[in-house]
């Protein structure tokens, strides 16, 4: 059987998710997560006096300081972990039968469709106007536009992505994303995760389409 090029495979994968073809592209194996090294912190030895008991001395102060230092390190480590998780956190939305992923860090705010004012393809908000982007048109121009329930404001590029439903948030590791081929004309697409039926949006690519 003739081997598919990366561009043909990508085309068939997206089309199969849209229900345009009966063929599906096999999912690439997902790399195993990296092993996390355990860190063992030793406790300093403590000298005990053999003399009679007296009131607490300054010997206890280094122990408290050490404990506070370790606690501070743990808090910093947790903050760092939260930052890493936030970088890999995505808002999932439903558009034209596809499950699309948008980086949470890129979303300025979510506006309800029912309370929004759109004039001439521009969404009017308290922060200014945003160009309305109907991703369904990029996916397939023949697709009927879904009712707009939400607008995702992408402040960096000054546009608002329409969607019919918010599907919650999920963590997506970059290593699990099968990136779009360089020859692809779907520049709105950053890549796909076949095992989870998710298409990751390329926000810079969408901005380029609006120029």
Image: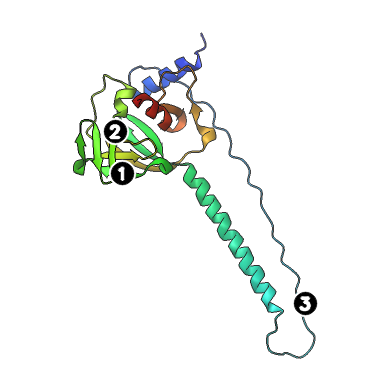
User: In the rendering, at what x and y percent does residue 112 appear?
Assistant: 24, 43
Task: Check disc 3: other Cα within 10 Å, few if <14, some if 14-19, many if 20+.
Answer: few
Q: Earlier in the sequence, mark 2 or mark 3?
A: 3
The picture quadrant where one finds residue 206 is top left
Say whether residue 165 is left or right of residue 189. Answer: left
Disc number placed over residue 202 in the picture, else none? none
Residue pushed farthest top?
2
Above or below residue 152? Residue 71 is below
Q: Nearer the viewer, mark 1 or mark 3?
A: 1
User: Relative to the observer, which residue lies in front, 127 or 189?
Assistant: 127
- The residue wearing badge 2 is 131
- The mark found on residue 47 in the picture is 3
- Residue tagged 1: 110
Q: Are marks 2 and 3 in contact (CB under 8 Å)?
A: no
Residue 154 quadrant: top left
Q: Is residue 199 visible?
A: no
Q: What secondary structure is marked by label 1?
A: strand
Residue found farthest to the right: 50
Q: Nearer the viewer, residue 39 or 151?
A: 151
């Amino acid at each position: 059987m003739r081997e598919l090029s990366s561009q043909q495979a990508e085309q068939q994968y997206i089309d199969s998710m849209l229900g345009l073809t009966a063929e599906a592209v096999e999912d690439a194996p997902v790399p195993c997560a990296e092993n996390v090294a355990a860190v063992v912190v030793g406790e300093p030895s403590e000298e005990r006096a053999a003399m009679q008991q007296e009131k607490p001395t300054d010997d206890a102060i280094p122990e408290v300081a050490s404990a506070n230092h370790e606690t501070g390190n743990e808090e910093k480590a947790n903050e760092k972990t939260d930052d890493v998780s936030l970088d890999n956190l995505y808002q999932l939305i439903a558009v034209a039968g596809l499950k699309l992923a948008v980086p949470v860090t890129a979303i300025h705010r979510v506006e309800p469709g029912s309370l929004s004012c759109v004039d001439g393809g521009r969404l009017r908000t308290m922060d200014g106007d945003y160009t309305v982007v109907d991703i369904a048109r990029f996916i397939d121009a023949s697709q009927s536009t879904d009712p707009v329930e939400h607008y995702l404001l992408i402040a960096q590029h000054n546009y608002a992505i329409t969607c019919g439903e918010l599907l919650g948030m999920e963590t997506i590791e970059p290593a699990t994303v099968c990136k779009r081929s360089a020859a692809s004309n779907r520049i709105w697409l950053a890549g796909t995760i076949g095992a989870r039926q998710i298409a990751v949006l390329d926000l810079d690519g969408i901005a380029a389409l609006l120029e």
